[in-house]
Amino acid sequence: MPDTKTLARGFMPPHVLERVAAQGSGRLRRCAQQTLEADHWFRQRGAPAPQRDAARAVAGRPDRRIYSAENEQTLPGRLVRDEGQPESGDPAVDEAYEGLGATYRFYWEVFERDSIDAKGMPLIGTVHYARDYDNAFWNGSQMVFGDGDGELFRRFTAALEVIAHELTHGVIERDVGLVYADQAGALNESLADVFGVLVKQYHAGESPQSADWLIGANLLTDQVQGQALRSMKAPGTAYDDPVLGSDPQPGHMRDFVDTQADNGGVHINSGIPNRAFYLAAVALEAPAWESVGPVWYAAMRDAALSREADFAAFAALTLDHAEHLHGPESREHRAVGEAWRGVGVIS
Amino acid sequence: MSKTELPVLSGDTRLAVAREGGFAYLPGLAAPREIDCDRLTPLQWARLDTGLRALVALPEAALMSPDGRFFRLTLSSRRTGQPHWQRCLDEPHAPAWLVRLWRDGHAALDEEVPSP
């Protein structure tokens, strides 16, 4: 990890960056340039969150608005598909529309939650953000998806769990506001992955045993040596590529990465609670959205969960809710305890 | 380690520029670009000093935006490895010269760097 300690030892693989910069027709060079010049984002971050539109909103039905930034960096951009309109023929637009709809349906049908704020908040997504932009993010009021550079990454709307992950960042922000750093940040990222993958499993009707438990399975191009960006089943095995490097996620507390990088390892150490959820889910026959999904959801919304919560605090809450929802010493209660013990969070 | 007062650049100074954050942490793309001052021409050295002084006025990265990206800049001693100064800038705040420096290395300093 490029933290201060490793910098002090002279850690430096410039050949990697130079290969990225020189690859192909120079598209990655342009990608880096144009991505990094995406300077409208910060101004947009301060925009107020959209409120329920009483004239349009009906509980149980999403209010989607898909915009195109038309490869510029202005948010939200031009409205290209409003709620109820037919397919546009643009894959990114239609994937965003369908993905937000699938995520809304999951939260409504499983948890009776009406959108991000539980009050019918419109679901706003912008696609074609900047040019060759290889990222997706939640900016506090909407979701933003890049097209990818086409050489390393495909468009970020291609993976339903990525769309659901970004929407879930909005849910987490509303419900608990977990600090986006260190263990609380890794827990934030893990919850976004957990509900992201649950949306994918719910949409496909998958059992925990048959699901792939991959995050970003459709994002990497054939040129990348990897199957996804993260694996909840086997953290640290999603990719091993000359350009991207090796998946750095640990799956157990003994391998916890103490680093300044990545906001204190939020996308790294999230592998530990991710694997705990996987272990709990596969220990039970029921679909994960019926067994441990509600346990994680209740723990996330518990007023006792602080903004600075660590893994152990969250684990304790999941045990409380597993007992409350399924009974003391129920199979679910035992599975949750075994899962957290399995990743070394509790003993 | 200071986050505001820029130390005087010397022949022992090394600048590391890393891009971090995003939907996933990708070690290969997060690896820092390193610039050793003693390998710079006098003009490149002056431009680096100018550019870094301009960065001091920019806000520190919020580090709170889910999946947002940012740059981490660290000045350290090549001899001891001791870091002297570090700043984190949100990706949208990164000036074009810094992006070029991360992408192309010290050759980016062959181009003009805006004054503060």
Image (cartoon, coloured by chain):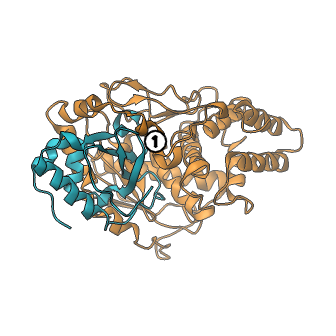
Q: Quadrant of residue A217?
A: top left
Q: Residue furthest right?
A: A328
Q: Quadrant of residue A69?
A: bottom left
Closer to us: A163 or A287: A163
Per the image, label 1 sits on a secondary structure element best described as loop
Which chain is mark 1 on?
A: A
Give left or right: position of A226 versus A110: left
Closer to us: A282 or A268: A268
Mark 1: give few (<14), some (14-19) or many (20+) Cα within 10 Å. some
Image quadrant occupied by the C terminus of chain B: bottom left
Residue position marked by numbered label 1 in the rendering: A3
The chain coloured orange is: A
Image quadrant occupied by the N terminus of chain B: bottom left
Chain B display color: cyan
Q: Is residue A266 visible?
A: no
Residue B60 vertical position relative to residue A328 in the rendered view, above or below: below
Please name the residue shown 58% across and 44% down the image: A190
Q: Position of residue A316 (x, y in %)?
A: 78, 47
Q: Is residue B84 visible?
A: yes
